[in-house]
Image: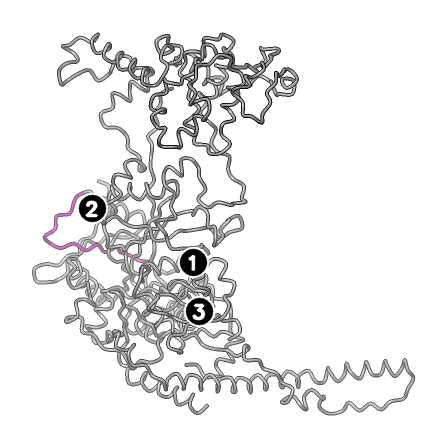
Amino acid sequence: MELCTQEEDSVQGTAATENSRIQIHFQQGTAFVWRAEDARRTREEHGLVGNLVGALVRKPRQNTRLGLPLQLLPEEARLLLEIGAAQLVHHGSSADKTYDVDEKESYAQFLHQSYEEQWKLALQEKKRTLEGLSERIVEGRSKRKRQRIDQNEEPMELSSQGPIKELLNLEQTFHFPKEAMMVQIPTAQLHTGNVEEVDIQENKSEWPYLDKENHETRYKVFSDLWQKGYYLTSGGKFGGDFLVYPGDPMRFHAHYIAICFSQAEDIALSDIITAGRLGTNVKKTVLLCSLDREGHVTYTSLQWSGL
Amino acid sequence: MLSPAELFAARSREQSIPQRSHGQKDFLPDGSRTQEEKLQICRAEQWELLTEERVERLGSLGRGVWKPEEELVELTLPAGKFWQNMGFTEGGRQCLLPEEAVYLLECGSIQLFYRDLPMSVQEAYQKLLSAGRVRLLHYQVYSHLKRLGYIVTRFDPSSIQLPYERQINLERRAGSSRKRKRSPTRPRLETQNESDTSGSNSREESNSSKPKRPPYPEPVTSCAPKPITFEHDVLENIKVEEKAKNTSPLHTKETDCDKETVKSPRDYRWDFSKICFPNCANDQPCLNLPDPEPALLPDNVVGRQVDISPWMRRLNLRPEKFSRREQEQWDWEQKYKVSINADPKVKKCSNWREYKKVLEEREHQRHRERPAHLWASTVGPLLTPGRVTSTASVLEQLTVIGQSTLLEDGKRLQDSQDNPQIDFNLFQADGNSEYKKSKPGKPCAYLCVRSFDEPIPTLRAMKSLAHQSGDVPVVFALVDCGEIAFYTFKDLQLPVDIYP
């Protein structure tokens, strides 16, 4: 038990020191948030939505509601990093080499203690239920006894006062098999010791977006709309770059479909018509977004109108 | 890590997920209290679900050990129900592929260990999905489909049927007890020819000069000489060389030294004009099969004369009855199609070489008949006389750009390296699916996993994939930042409104 609390303390301790920054874990060019608390803060403190991609703990075999990890758009991750709200961490392969025997032992110990503890808890629960039911048990037994006496017509003393016999030596007879013990499959990594912080400017291999031609425009547009208080999600399913919501997407529908273009780019008329028609059909306004020479974002909206 | 008390308490925690029914979404945030409250409820629900940790009864958990050098997870406890459609056995061990292990871990069905320590889901993502064929992108598609209830297996290029195997409807794995679909009905023309010849067989010569298919190309192995002995039975007058008498032609085919005889069939060709074939059609009331020449029979076989009339009575000799469609087809063929065998010149040919010679001559003849000013220059008429048999064929010859289907040219385009590859087989897992791990059968789709940033596959790539997949549809799974959309390309044949 002691060890367990110690471990808890240490986990909480590291959490407290790192509380100021959300941890974004990087894997094959994908940004994940693994801790529920970080996911909450991403949304509530910073107004960034992300996308849950894991199986929901409570009901893992369905797709309507998903669980951790929270996958961030590259723009969301970069924004969090640039405003200093998050740190990008990477699990180096070096972590594999330091193999801790102590860790293994402490895990075995923890399992053992957890079992002992759960045994006690199960015992208490059993005791409580038995106590709660003892009156009825006693009642039922005496009834049966009386019936037997009636049949045999043998006078017998009714000695069923006080606690029932099961309750007396419960601790000796109580059986709590090891299989009945509950174990946890942790979602986020528990040992945060072997993470290394990554600077995206220096590690282009970790952050493949910097070189992508559209990324800069997308990022500028994203952060500009975000600063204006909008919520944004990925707009792929509507043929755009982002979907723009006036409030949290949980409670509001998207108003705009943002499509990013570089300013020098020629846009085919057919593309504009396609975008406009699509936007009208889903009752959203299409925003054509690009950067001017000073780096400010300019928006052009398309409206479907009769002559 | 959860404390024992928390773990114990998790036994009786909520099992159902809250239904998101907090009214319609609003149009604009107006700063009102009701809106704020609704949002808070939604968010609270969300965080409640997300903070929940996986807690399972130890007894109901499988147990696997991650072996990075082999890229598999070895199960150290006997597998559970998931073994029905996941995992494989290797060297007596029950194993899981990395994606299967991560999925089962996410579902709370197994515990994963690495260096004797339990892995978190995060560690499993980082370790199991960073090497090998199935990466993060693929896993997202895999787990999405698994959660939907499909059976998903890795695609193995060797499992695919060759186009020829598909054509002859060959089931790959032998020993199947499953009901097999009846092979597609044979081409009608062939059966008609059979009935044709049997009908006109009464005239002896009709069969005589026809290049009868020699019996030896049949690659039947041991007890094959049956049809040949039958012919020996009936023939009375044969000009066969000694060699051909003793060794059945079949064996000559098999042994290389006798190849020569195959090449020049003329040497021991039978004179069919003198051979009487028994006709068992119902227009022949009775027929006696004469006593076979004893010299042609093996030593231990006694030949005798047979009256086949009692057999005839037992045969089902009902005339073939056509359905309306078959009748139409037959009528049409009678009208437009001419049997090559009716041609007297062709009849005179006794082997393929002669027949081909006749064809060549005719081709020459045709060219000679054509006026030179039309046909000799590089620009000529679009239609070739003689090849015009129907309106459809005229139009077909006139088309400059023909229609192409996805399945065409696939073989030629296959060697390209940058083609998208099929990643997964998809099987339905409902009641009528016949999926078995040992005999998966035909998948309901093949899956190609692509990232949203990748370009649309080219027609070339599509054709190559279609060639590989045959009649199983290829589905593209596009992953856009964790969201998955499925697309298929379908062949469209423009209708041709001409009959026939």
Q: Position of residue A38 (x, y in %)?
A: 32, 75
Label 2 packing within 10 angstroms: few (<14), some (14-19), many (20+):
some
Residue A79 magenta: no
Q: Which residue is mark 1?
A: B146
Query: Viewed as shown, does residue B120 lie left or right of B417?
Result: right
**Mark 2 falls within which chain?**
A
Front residue (pair A26, B110): B110
Instruction: Give the quarter of the image for residue A54.
Output: bottom left
Compared with residue A233, is residue B463 higher up or lower down, i.e. above or below?
A: above
Compared with residue A116, is residue B424 higher up or lower down, i.e. above or below?
A: above
Is the C terminus of chain B in the top left, top right, bottom left or bottom right quadrant? top left
Front residue (pair A73, A244): A73
Q: Which residue is mark 3?
A: A57
Tag of residue A272: 2
Marks 1 and 3, how far apart at CA:
15 Å
Give the label, 3 or 2, closer to the camera.
Answer: 3
Tag of residue B482: none
Residue found 91% across the figure and 86% down from its top: A154
Q: Position of residue B182 (x, y in %)?
A: 51, 34
Q: Which residues are magenta?
A: A253-269
Q: The residue under label 3 is which amino acid type?
A: Val
**Mark 1 falls within which chain?**
B
Q: The residue under label 2 is which amino acid type?
A: Ile
